[in-house]
Structure formats: C-alpha cells, structure tokens
Image (spheres, helix red, strand yellow):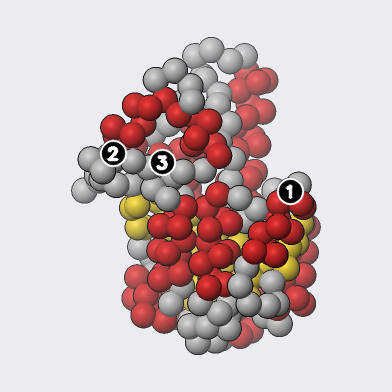
Amino acid sequence: MHGISGRAVLVTGASRGIGKATALAFAKVGDRVVVNHRDSRAEADEVVRSLPGSGHTAIQADLAIPESAAALVESTVAALGGLDVLVNNAGVSLPHDVAVDDFETWRAAWDRTLAVNLSGPAFVTYWAVQQMLKQGGGRIINISSRGAFRGEPGQPAYAATKAGLNAFGQSLALALGGRGIAVMTIAPGWVETEMAIAEMERPGGQEVLKQSPLGRMARPDEIAAAAVFLASPEAEFSTGAVLDINGASYLRT
C-alpha cells in the first residue's frame, strides 16, 4: 500500500452526497480517485473536474450486477495503476411498509435494496480484495447507518442491509487483518444530502434536527474526514470497528 498520499482510491456512488465529499477529501490529501456512478454520468464528470490534483476519472457500473462490479475494479486498476482504498458508499433507501404494501411491491423494494446495499458492496469487495492481496495490503471502508442498530420501520430492508454490511466488514477484518487489509465501517445518522433535505421538507420533517443535541444533521465532509482517517496507516488497529457519527442522536452500548 502506498503512503498517506498518492494512493489509488475507489469511491462507489460518488456523484453526490457522502460519496462526492469523500472523493474530494481523498483528492485533497493527494490521492487519485475513481468516481463511480450508476446512471449519473454528467454529475460524476463534474465531480471529477472539481477534484484537486490529477489522475481522477469517472467509471460507470451497476454494482448489483456481479459482472459490472468486477469490471469496475478492473477498470479502476487500469486507470489508477492499482487499488489501495475502497469506499463502499453506494446505496439506496426505498420505502416499503410491511403493514400497507402489497407483497409484490414490498418484495420489489426489498430485493432492490439488498442487491444495491449488500450484494453490491460484497461483489466489489471480492474483486478489490484480490487486487489488494497482490499489492500486499489495502483499506476497505464501508458506509453503513445508525439504522442498523435502531431499526427503520418504514424501510426494513435498509436497516437489514446496513446491519449486514456491519457484520460483513467485521468478518473481513478478521479474515484479512493478517494479510495487510484493514476493514472499517462508518455508521452515520442523518447527513445533509439531497435525500435528507427532501425528507426535511415533508410535514414534520424538521423534527429530524431535534434528534441530536447539536440541533443539526452531519455534513457530508464530516463523514468524508472519518473515511480518510480510517484509511490512514495510523488507523490500522481500528480494523473491525464500526464508528458512529450521528451527533449523539442514537447511543448504543
């Protein structure tokens, strides 16, 4: 693995929100970044243009398709000359009420959420690990959610996939720690993204701000800063950790 700067970094779902901020944070410390997107080419290209430094590129891939996930890693290695850091950020949050929806509607949301939020990161991670093993090490950072711990009654698949992502990361931390690959997870609460802002505009949405004693949501750059730290050599002994960044809106013991 390269030093603190000049690393090859892949951020999934990086055309907006947390992914965009994370791509910027890694670029600011001198890393070269692949901005992955599924169907947001214009936005991804704009993110690439906004990044400091050089060597950045946007690569399209639907991570729920195994072949597409493998091709993403292959293209990343070709573009950057390797892969030192993978940030599994891409995800969806689809409402599906078990007490209201008909089964086919409910199942469709369930299947899509599992495909994007859990299978997708697993597919990308598999191929990333193969590359990192060749290089002698690397970092994998998963973006989870406080919903993994507190539950999400209106979107149970979201909570289930994030809980699964936590366990997946911890399993890989045990499996790969002796081979130079550290795996950590960040579990944010509400973050100022397009999705969160839309939620706040709904009736009663401002109540979200009262969940934290800080009276606000997290900024995307706060999540990004944690990702950069966890990818650093100094954070190696944090492998297996799940870091809560939710402004004390949910405290677990």
* 214 sits left or right of 141 in the view: left
User: Where 165 sits versus 141, above or below?
Assistant: above
Q: Amino acid at mark 1?
A: Ser
- Determine the residue positioned at 64% across, 64% down: 50
User: In terms of secondary structure, where does tag 2 sit?
Assistant: loop
Identify residue for label 2: 215
Which numbered disc, 3 or 1, marks the residue that appears first in the sequence?
Answer: 1
Q: Please name whichever residue, 62 or 217, is drawn nearer the observer in this view of the structure.
A: 217
* 123 sits left or right of 1 in the view: right
Q: Amino acid at mark 3?
A: Trp
Q: Position of residue 100 (x, y in %)?
A: 53, 12
Q: Amino acid at mark 2?
A: Gly
| Circle 2/circle 1 CB separation < 8 Å | no
- Quadrant of the rendered image containing residue 10: bottom right
Which numbered disc, 2 or 1, marks the residue that appears first in the sequence?
Answer: 1
Q: CA distance from mark 2 to mark 1?
A: 32 Å
Q: Position of residue 151 (x, y in %)?
A: 39, 34
